[in-house]
Image (spheres, rainbow, N blue to C red):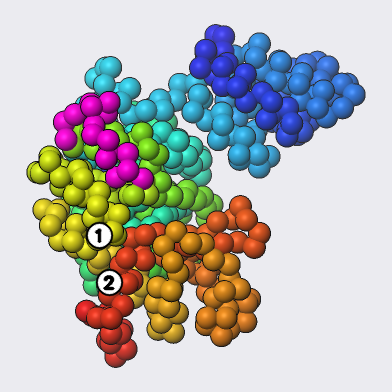
Amino acid sequence: MALEEGARSCLLRCRHRLEEDIKPPYLMDHMISDGVMTVDEEERITTQPTRKDQAVSLVELLLMKDNRAYISFYNALIKEKYEDLAILLFPNLPRTLTDGQKNTSDGSLSYVQAVLSEGGVPQRPVVFVSRPELLNRVREKLYRLQKDPGWITVFGMAGSGKSVLAAEAVRDHRLIEDCFPGGIHWLSIGQVEKPDLLVKIQSLCFRLEQNLDSQSLSRPPNSLDEAKERLRFLMLRKYPRTLLILDDIWDSTVLKAFDIQCRLLLTTRNRSLTDSVSGAKYEVEVESGLDESKGLEILALYTKAKVQGLPEEARSIVRECKGSPLVVSLIGALLKEKPNRWRYYLCQLQQKQFKRIRKSSSYDYDALDQAMAASIEVLPDEHQDLYKDLTVIEKDVKIPAKVLSVLWDLEQEEVEDILEEFVNKSLLFVDNNSKPYLYYLHDLQLDFLRSVDNKMSVCTKRRCLCW
Ligand SMILES: Nc1ncnc2c1ncn2[C@@H]1O[C@H](COP(=O)(O)OP(=O)(O)O)[C@@H](O)[C@H]1O
Ligand SMILES: [Mg+2]
């Protein structure tokens, strides 16, 4: 079978990057052991005078080969740590559906739906736009769990679309068949205490045991340790090659209960949660940026209009929302109710009146306030105060660590550590393209901080934020 057209054109597109970066001998070793390349072919390439010449010949050869060679080359890139390049090839991996919507062409959609609803994976939101690049990044990591267990962390700030993305990533027939034939189970975790976590694992075990024909149901595990052992047994013996999705994890101690050598994807605002667990680990960052066309698409879907027919304020609204799917959806939902208020909502956004917008929304966007408050609450007390000081940052201004070192009267290194913590918890953004790094807040965060600044008092005793 010849190389698929999509894969071929992907190779042609990425040719230049590949030729610049790869070292063919290492990659060819993998391809030979996969049986997609002969020793003669390898020799012809290695006798080329320079690394670049070798790379050029390897790409040339790949273009003449088949799908298996493409897949083998892709795997070789991963094994040799050319992850950036592998990502370029991933969308066109032969036999890999890259868009859940392709499933509709045959009976496979109902298969996908059956698997996902059995595992409690949420459906798509009514208004939904695809984010193919992010989706591919998550699916590419999911494929890494095909052979071995491991952890995928999908992280980003509140409302950046992590949960929607995680659910969408597994909505793919081929992926389920290839990687998780045992099923996919979704657990909403949130900020749980131990007893609630136990209940959640109990009901997962119950669900899993219920599906096993012969066994009579055993009594529920009655401690977290017991629950962990039960889950370990079930995943290892009865449900190998099953994916667990843990949605909205706050605390790494929760992950300890799942540290049982299985396949896991978690969504979180906190980047470094998996530090304390064992196994392979992968990360996907969800920046909160929908591009303009996606933002407009959401507004059009809410208001049942064509993108071309949207009023002139639409673009400015999307710009003001800074691409946050949550905020664009919020405005979209408001406009659906009051289609004449484009200008009004734009003005409110421009004046950063998020609070009023949130209030007048029929949506549960108190959740946004709560999410922000909760993110701050998990910081150590002294860092909460430092975070609140960030209200001094002007809108749309990025500042270096040095400025904060003056403000906080701390050594610059200490400041950098604190800022890293904020960034890892998606409470702050960093612009790595400049030297020194520049830090900034999302408008929503700044607005939130300012609006609660006066009213907020930290109840140090109960360690909660009240206003
Ligand atoms: N791909 C998308 N298309 C349309 N709306 C989206 C999309 N992703 C997120 N949203 C909107 O943003 C809201 C927040 O998304 P969610 O995935 O819950 O964010 P997070 O888990 O990062 O807090 C959703 O309820 C939805 O309204
Ligand atoms: Mg979520």
Q: Which mark is residue 451?
A: 2
What crowding class fits label 2: few (fewer than 14 Cα within 10 Å), some (14-19), or many (20 or more)? some
Tell me what residue is drawn at x 64 percent, y 63 percent.
436
**21 and 72: which is toward the camera:** 21
Look at the image and say whether residue 116 sits in the magenta stretch. Answer: no
**304 and 75: which is toward the camera:** 304
Write down the quadrant of residue 312 in the picture.
top left
Query: Is residue 388 shown above or below 396?
Result: below
Quadrant location of the C terminus in the rendered image: bottom left
Tell me what residue is drawn at x 59 percent, y 34 percent.
86
Query: Is residue 96 shown above or below 184?
Result: above
Identify the residue under disc 1: 354
**Whether residue 420 can be seen here:** yes
**346 and 274: which is toward the camera:** 346
| Residue 455: x %, y % from top left | 24, 81
| Residue 277: x %, y % from top left | 49, 63
Outermost residue on the top side: it is 1
Q: Secondary structure at mark 2?
A: helix
| Residue 262: x %, y % from top left | 43, 51
Please provide the residue range marked out in magenta.
303-319
Please report contact status of discs 1 and 2: CB closer than 8 Å, yes or no: yes
Residue 149 relative to residue 308: left or right: right
Write down the quadrant of residue 129 in the picture.
top left
Q: Amino acid at mark 2?
A: Ser
Look at the image and say whether residue 310 sits in the magenta stretch. Answer: yes
Quadrant location of the N terminus in the rendered image: top right
**43 and 376: which is toward the camera:** 376
Q: Secondary structure at mark 1?
A: helix
